[in-house]
Image: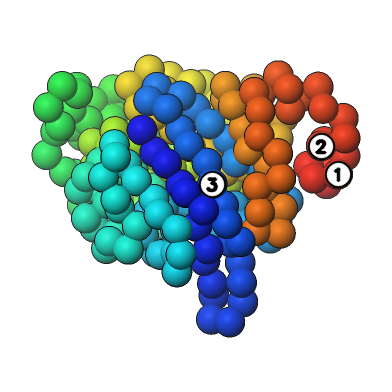
Amino acid sequence: MLSVDDIHVYYGESYVLQGVSLHVNQGEIVCLLGRNGAGKTTTMRSIIGYNPPRKGQITLDDRVISGRPVYENVRQGIGFVPEDRRIFPLLTVEENIEVALLPPREGFTPWTSERIFDEFPLLARLRTRLGGELSGGEQQVLAIARALAGNPRFLLLDEPCEGLAPVIVEMLGEIITNLSKEITILVAEQNARFALKISSRGYVIDKGKVCYEGTSRELVENDDIQCRYLAV
């Protein structure tokens, strides 16, 4: 469904991604693992369109999306939950969702405001609360719900566990697993234990290059990769 083919990305003169390639099949949860600064977030931002590659190509359903504006990629069906969540602090939970609503896609059960509040009872209880008054975990759930309001077919989750308590991380794992029944997901995460538990395959990135790929089981059992690239 998604193919990232040998992309090279710069921040100014800084050469950040140096030929990253990966793919995600329809219906999968795939994780992108690595330490802070390895290139995970840049990869996600390149896919959605914030940092288009100078070289290489990104396709969704065999259509080239690299170099296109973010809004076009969102309209084509990509949802993005950024590392810093970016919820609107002066809007209520309900308003945060309403501003992101896009028309439903053919063949998919639409994510309406009503469905989102049914699926996320935590948010239903907080629907009149301002975004800036929510806890970190509540903001993360809202960020995911807001991405769903765009009725995506493919979802990018960038560091969803960062700074959250273990009980919230466990809840997020259940949410992501349930979403994968309808939506294909790529999750970038430093918490390898969490990511490998919910995904079927994974890529390890280091210094802007993919240095290993394999099934989640292979990654869990590979002590060398764990120690060299994933240990904190």
Residue lying at 52% horizontally and 41% vertically, measured from the top left: 22
Residue under pointer 3: 21
Q: Is residue 95 visible?
A: no
Label 1 and label 2: CA atoms lie apart by 5 Å
Please report whichever mark, 2 or 3, sits nearer to the chain's N-terminal start. 3
Q: Amino acid at mark 3?
A: Ser
Q: Nearer the viewer, residue 220 or 90?
A: 220
Residue under pointer 1: 228
Q: Position of residue 204 (x, y in %)?
A: 68, 42
Q: Amino acid at mark 1?
A: Arg
Q: Amino acid at mark 2?
A: Ile
Is residue 107 found left or right of 32 in the rendered image? left
Is residue 87 found left or right of 161 in the rendered image? left
Q: Secondary structure at mark 3?
A: strand
Residue lying at 26% horizontally and 45% vertically, measured from the top left: 63
Kindly indicate the quadrant of the structure image that contains residue 152. Answer: top left
Are the residues flagged by discs 1 and 3 in contact, CB closer than 8 Å? no
Residue under pointer 2: 225
Q: Secondary structure at mark 2?
A: helix
